[in-house]
Image: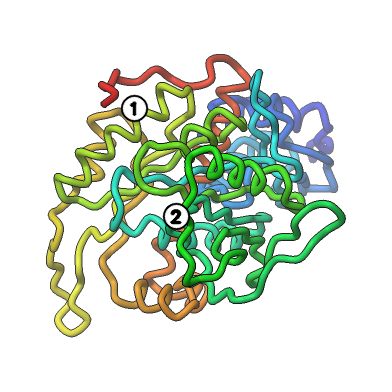
């Protein structure tokens, strides 16, 4: 009978197991905790950089392959899973949002591509992984988040700060919950900028892992203020497959890059309509435009969302699809995209801590 395995042997075997996305040893990253050998079982706690980690199963397989049969006497591995969401590092001249680890801006080059629908469902998909999530409606002139969430009450106060509304555990802030819904917001740029800064710094956000920020279309004051005021984790670009949408998207990507904000990836919305009767897919707005754009600009393609009436109807009724039918086939698309997005945030934070704020990527003209 071989002697029992030692902790040193276990650590030596695990030293070669890398994080599949960060490409650094798990031990070096501090992701393996409480290592111990109990008879023929190796036990440990794996601390992921996000609870939405899409590589969880792969990490488990690679830990088992490194230990079982390689460390004398170890016949099995038992893992305890945990998560500690990484934080975007501070940037000179940009103030961190109190209580928020990461701010993710959801952007689009033009209106009508379903950006708010995507932002709302992504926020709930991230929350479903166990992350603490907030949603900031930064579209001051056209705030649609309250409609999509069925919010009619006004936010309260927390001392001298504003308390965000709660929708099924999601912390929400929108100008649409403060002003009369029938009253237009007719503000010049400086008033809009002041309102956005209040939503960032005067709201009592409660220890969020992710604050999803739904931006207005285009590349105006809100985008500029957000990028210059806080250390953004990155921007997500929402587009449809059609050429006119893709043309505007390149301007948004160029803006983020010029402002040194990481572009976390491209999401293609309304990618195809699947007939509920025969199952045939009709490419109403074209096909694979977002995927091809991401490939051409060397950006991650986070996923494609089908054109589905249930997504639209859920938002209009104040019951977003991921909240109303979290286990449905359509919701799984958002869950998959949320996992990819969370992974990109972790990678962007790791790169920022290790070196340049963002990769240069192909240069784009700024209109």
Q: Residue furthest top?
A: 355
Say which element carries label 2. loop
Earlier along the polypeptide chain: callout 2 or callout 1?
Answer: 2
In this view, the mark in front (2 or 1):
2
Residue 82: image location, x then y, percent: 72, 50
Q: Quadrant of the C terminus?
A: top left
Label 1 Cα crowd, 10 Å radius (few <14 / some 14-19 / many 20+) = many
Q: Residue at x 29, y 23 (%)?
A: 366
Q: Residue at x 83, y 41 (%)?
A: 34
Say which element carries label 1. helix
Q: Residue at x 62, y 58 (%)?
A: 173
| Residue 17 horizontal side relative to residue 163, left or right | left
Residue 98: image location, x then y, percent: 75, 41
Label 2 Cα crowd, 10 Å radius (few <14 / some 14-19 / many 20+) = some
On residue 147, the disc is: none
Nearest the eye: 15 or 279: 279
Determine which quarter of the picture holds residue 101: top right
On residue 141, the disc is: 2
Task: Name the residue that disc number 1 marks.
Answer: 254
Q: Residue furthest bottom?
A: 277
Q: Residue at x 76, y 66 (%)?
A: 156
Determine which quarter of the picture holds residue 272: bottom left
Residue 274: image location, x then y, percent: 20, 72
Q: Is residue 303 visible?
A: yes
Residue 165: image location, x then y, percent: 68, 66
Q: Is residue 78 visible?
A: no
| Residue 260 horizontal side relative to residue 156, left or right | left
| Residue 320 horizontal side relative to residue 286, left or right | right
Q: How is the image coloured?
A: rainbow
Nearest the eye: 291 or 139: 139
Nearest the eye: 367 or 190: 190
């Amino acid at each position: 009978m071989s002697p029992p395995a030692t902790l040193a042997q276990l650590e030596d075997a695990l030293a070669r197991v890398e994080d599949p996305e960060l490409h650094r040893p798990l031990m070096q990253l501090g992701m393996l905790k409480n290592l111990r050998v109990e008879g023929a079982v190796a036990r440990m706690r794996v601390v992921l950089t996000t609870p939405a980690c899409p590589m969880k199963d792969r990490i488990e397989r690679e830990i088992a392959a490194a230990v079982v049969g390689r460390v004398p006497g170890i016949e099995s591995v038992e893992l305890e899973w945990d998560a500690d969401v990484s934080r975007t590092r501070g940037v000179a001249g940009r103030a961190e949002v109190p209580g928020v680890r990461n701010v993710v801006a959801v952007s689009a080059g033009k209106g009508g591509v379903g950006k708010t629908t995507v932002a709302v469902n992504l926020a709930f998909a991230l929350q479903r992984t166990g992350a603490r999530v907030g949603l900031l409606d930064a579209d001051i002139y056209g705030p649609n988040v309250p409609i999509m969430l069925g919010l009619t009450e006004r936010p309260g106060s927390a001392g001298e700060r504003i308390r965000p509304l709660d929708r099924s555990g999601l912390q929400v802030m929108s100008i649409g919950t403060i002003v009369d819904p029938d009253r237009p917001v007719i503000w010049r740029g400086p008033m809009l900028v002041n309102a956005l800064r209040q939503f960032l710094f005067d709201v009592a956000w409660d220890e969020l892992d992710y604050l999803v920020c739904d931006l207005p279309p285009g590349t105006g004051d809100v985008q500029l203020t957000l990028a210059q005021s806080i250390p953004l984790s990155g921007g997500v670009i929402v587009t449809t497959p059609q050429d006119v949408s893709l043309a505007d998207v390149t301007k948004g990507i160029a803006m983020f890059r010029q402002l040194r904000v990481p572009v976390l990836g491209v999401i293609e919305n309304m990618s195809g309509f699947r007939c509920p009767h025969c199952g045939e897919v009709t490419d109403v707005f074209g096909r694979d435009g977002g995927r091809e754009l991401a490939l051409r600009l060397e950006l991650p393609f986070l996923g494609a969302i089908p054109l589905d009436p249930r997504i639209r109807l859920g938002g209009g009724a104040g019951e977003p699809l991921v909240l109303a039918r979290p286990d449905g086939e359509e919701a799984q698309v958002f869950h998959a995209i949320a996992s990819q997005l969370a992974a990109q945030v972790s990678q962007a934070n790791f790169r920022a801590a290790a070196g340049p704020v963002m990769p240069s990527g192909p240069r784009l003209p700024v209109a």
